[in-house]
Image: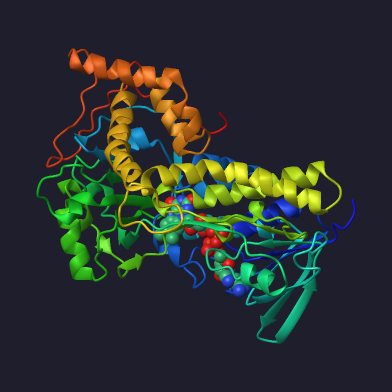
Amino acid sequence: MVGRETAVVLGGSVAGLCAAGVLARHFDTVIVLERDELPPDARHRRGVPQSKHPHFLLNSGRRAIGEIFPGFEEALIGAGGMHLMPSMDAAYCENDGWAPRKSGSMTMVYSSRVLIERVLRDKVREVPAIEIREGATVTGLRSHGGGTARGRVEGVEFRTADGDGYLAADLVVDALGRGSSVVDWLSAAGWAAPPEKTLDAKVTYTSRWYDLPPTGERPASWWWRHLVVTPTQDTGDHPAEHEFLSNFFPIEGDRAIVCMGSWGIEMPRKVDAFEAAVDRVRATTFGRATRACTPTSEVHLTRSTGNKWRRFDLLDVPPIGLVCVGDSICAFNPFYAQGMSSAARSALILGEMLRGRDALDAAFFREFLGRQKKALDVPWMLAMARDQAYDFATGTEVVAAWRRRLAGRLSWPIFNAINAASREDAYVERTFAEVFNLDRSLREMAADPRFWFGIARYKLRRRLGRTVVPGGFDDREDPPGTDYTQLAGGTSGDRGGDLVGA
Ligand SMILES: Cc1cc2nc3c(=O)[nH]c(=O)nc-3n(C[C@H](O)[C@H](O)[C@H](O)COP(=O)(O)OP(=O)(O)OC[C@H]3O[C@@H](n4cnc5c(N)ncnc54)[C@H](O)[C@@H]3O)c2cc1C
């Protein structure tokens, strides 16, 4: 191997830690520079304000992190994470009411974002080649030949309480998140700025943390662990809260994050307004359950949710010696839960390339960007499919009014049709779960005749009154706990079919 002595990773959050785990197999030393002091336990910190909101770890991300850090999932569960099957353990209030409860193909590990990061840090600390320097603010890059075919990033400038420092590096990985200044530093050194694709669908999240009541004090109807209430598509008069996407999201330690989000609606940021809004969510169980819990935090609100993709792959001469991973290259509307998984996937691509290639030359970086772009296309397309429907969205990816109208008319009805058909068609259910988990692209799903046949068949059966699994249960009642797995053609109590490892 040539030039594989030192790799420097900028940022010690999910993307940075995943990259460090991969690089440790290929470099003598991997140094992670992180501005924050990292807590030993699962605690919020300044550099990751989004940790106050629910974080779904998709199956593709869970698998990718497990490849980088074997035993990650077990450690997360050991620390309090819960391995659940959403179709059995979550109550979904869809457009027509509560969905039936049944076994499905997808499982998830639920935990707080701070716990995911703590477990990742524990894993990283087991790797002798990785050194995390905390309290180290990256302030710039050093390079030569910026903007030319031989232009290379050679090292990183940083500042600590002891003063300024510099690290020479054979490879620099930018994992500084949405606010990364790497493009500014590259531009100052002579590189063209990468074209940016953006679409801000004005999504706002508002969240508050709660302790659950002891199990014995919950009503019998509280069989569920997770509540999801999707926005209504009813066009009549209704409170704004009916258009929220609301989650009662379970986390370790018998706690939950109550989170309401919306596209383009003003969200509550004060406790009184939050509590009033919770009571107006259209599924009344949501408000009742929240009021039965004990709040343990203030209300946290964020609007830092726009989709943004820095297209380094489109540069005529991308820098040699630098890759960007995680939110620094591509950040998504968090409704689709794609950020951590895409970050881990980029780290894996880097690892595959380092295994297969010797020289860290221009061809290496060009190929990496091509492969990373292909991987990012999958979540990006999924985010665009919904976010492009909003007239108030801004950015380079805004589409013509007729396409917005079309997307607006089609996307929720198609989503509802998929959910309905999933009740009785295991292929439709599994295909959509694979797309949601980024194991399949939207394009593949759209071109799959078996998938559309399943939806059409279900619609016909419904019209003929031949469906067997009921749905659309009254959202003013508690969600029914009946297990419809057998009626749907599965085996009652079957909690298999995990997409993990599929
Ligand atoms: C409200 C919300 C909800 C989300 N929900 C989900 C979800 O359900 N599922 C999901 O997969 N993703 C979700 N995401 C996205 C997810 O948080 C990110 O994709 C993920 O954190 C990966 O980010 P990152 O490591 O690239 O950057 P970040 O997590 O933003 O970390 C950047 C790191 O760089 C450090 N840093 C910054 N500047 C400097 C500097 N100059 N010097 C040194 N260090 C520096 C910071 O301290 C921080 O540690 C959500 C995001 C938001 C905003």
Farthest residue in the left direction?
Answer: 237
Q: Is residue 425 shown to the viewer in this render?
A: no
Asked if residue 354 lies left or right of residue 66, the reply is right
Q: Residue at x 13, y 36 (%)?
A: 474
Farthest residue in the right direction?
Answer: 2
Residue 425, image x, y percentages = 35, 20
Asked if residue 462 lies left or right of residue 335, the reply is left
Residue 468, image x, y percentages = 23, 16
Residue 432, image x, y percentages = 42, 31
Q: Residue at x 80, y 49 (%)?
A: 363
Residue 375, image x, y percentages = 59, 42
Quadrant in which residue 162 is drawn: bottom right
| Viewer-side residue, 233 vs 31 | 233
Q: Is residue 293 shown to the viewer in this render?
A: yes
| Viewer-side residue, 464 vs 118 | 464
Quadrant of the frame with the C terminus? top right
> In the rendered view, would you say 143 is above or below 397?
below
Q: Residue at x 47, y 53 (%)?
A: 332
Quadrant in which residue 17 is drawn: bottom right
